[in-house]
Amino acid sequence: MLLGKVIGTVVANIKYEGLEGVPLLLIQPLDKYRNPKGEPLVACDATGMAGPGELIYYEGGREAALALDPWFVPVDHTIVGIVDNVHLTEGDG
């Protein structure tokens, strides 16, 4: 799982068959301390509930394609959950 923050929405006039109705969100990948890590990317929202400003976790690659129904649509990243809190213990550095 990868940590990220939703920073915007993406509107597509035409979508691949199987992605109709799936929200597309712009996310900023984060490290475990919630610092930006890399460039923003577009992800499908399998939860259907994530929105701008929310902390999320997502999958990339083959796992991202398997998270949607119908499974194995051509996507690179999919949001699979909304994070309520991150707690690091000593030694997690």
Image (spheres, helix red, strand yellow):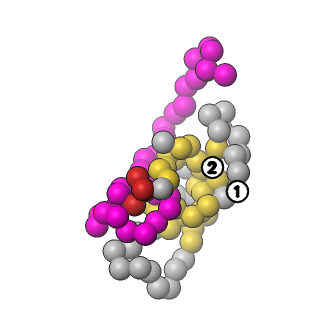
Q: Secondary structure at mark 2?
A: strand
**Residue furthest top as drawn:** 90
71 relative to 12 in the view: left or right: left
Amino acid type, mark 1: Glu
Residue 39, labelled with which disc? 1
Residue 50 seen in the current view: no
Where is residue 53? Give x, y as percent: 60, 52
Give residue 10's position: percent from left, percent from top.
56, 72
Q: Is residue 17 magenta?
A: no
- For marks 1 and 2 on the same chain, the one whose residue lies earlier in the sequence: 2
Confirm whether the magenta stretch covers residue 67.
yes
Give neighbour class at mark 1: few <14, some 14-19, many 20+ (Cα, 10 Å): few
Helix, strand or loop at label 1? It is loop
Q: Is residue 61 visible to us here?
A: yes
49 lies above or below 22:
above
Give how far across and how far down residue 39 sits, in percent: 70, 56
**Residue with the most extreme bottom position:** 13
Residue type at mark 2? Pro
Q: Nearer the viewer, residue 49 or 36?
A: 36
In percent of the image, x 46 and y 46: which residue is there?
Answer: 82
Q: Is residue 5 left or right of residue 62?
A: right
What range of the chain is rendered magenta?
A: 66-93
Q: Which residue is mark 2?
A: 29
C-alpha gap between disc 1 and disc 2: 7 Å
Q: Residue at x 48, y 38 (%)?
A: 84
Q: Is residue 25 left or right of residue 62?
A: right
73 up-or-down from 36: above or below: below
Residue 46 sits in which quadrant?
bottom left
Callout 1 touching callout 2 (CB < 8 Å)? yes
